[in-house]
Amino acid sequence: MDYNSLKAEVEQKTAQTLEVLQNEYAGLRTGRASVHLLDGVRVPVYGSEMPLNQVATVSTPDNQTLSVTVWDVSNAPAVEKAIRDSGLGLNPMTAGGVIRLNLPPLTEERRRELTKVSGKYAEEAKISMRNIRQDAMNKIKRAGTDKEISEDEQHRYEEDLQKVFDGRSAEVDAIAKQKETDIMSV
């Protein structure tokens, strides 16, 4: 058993889990406009569904407004409909190839709902990391059982991996706490 490759694999998988969490948080609305708010919107154009950022440019002229500049003006109605149907609660206003989205201020109730969603995303990330940890620990135990490594090595590897997971878990908690603070700040 090659412990270094196992540890590298674990670090890569946990880093990907953190990346997924941050991408999910980017699409979660806070009190300010963010160009990532529309990342999950898919637009039916050219015979297939494409991500919004492949048919338009999203910008934030101020912190309560999003501006979507559609590259092909004939796609503007499809983009507008996709934004309206996205479930984000946004009401697009179209002027030619430019779609403006005014973000209404979040109510206290909506902020609390978003905080719960934020917590759910963090918990999903932790569950994913626990699964990665369990898989890695099983590989180490199997190597110990098959006498590929000594008991001392097995114990040392398990402790070393646990430190990696503790660090990543702390990162998830920090990211989640920051997002919750962003959501609750007016």
Image (tube, grey):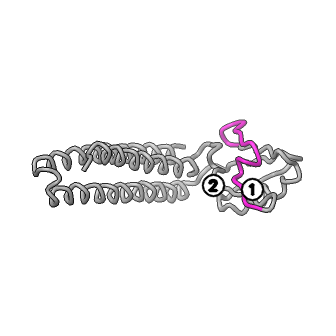
The span picked out in magenta is: 48-65
- Asked whether residue 61 is drawn in magenta, I would say yes
Q: Are marks 1 and 2 in contact (CB under 8 Å)?
A: no
> Which quadrant holds the C terminus?
top right
Q: Quadrant of residue 128?
A: bottom left
Residue 143 at x, y = what percent? Answer: 20, 56
Please state which of residues 72 and 9 is positioned toward the viewer in this rendering: 9
The disc label shown at residue 40, or none = 2
Q: Earlier in the sequence, mark 1 or mark 2?
A: 2
Magenta residues, dominant SS class: strand
The x, y position of residue 81, in whole percent, is: 78, 60
- Circle 2 Cα neighbour tier, 10 Å, few/some/many (<14 / 14–19 / ≥20): some
Q: Secondary structure at mark 2?
A: loop
**Residue sitting at x 84%, y 54%:** 75
Residue 91 is labelled as: 1
Q: Residue at x 67, y 59 (%)?
A: 89
67 or 72, which is in the foreground?
72
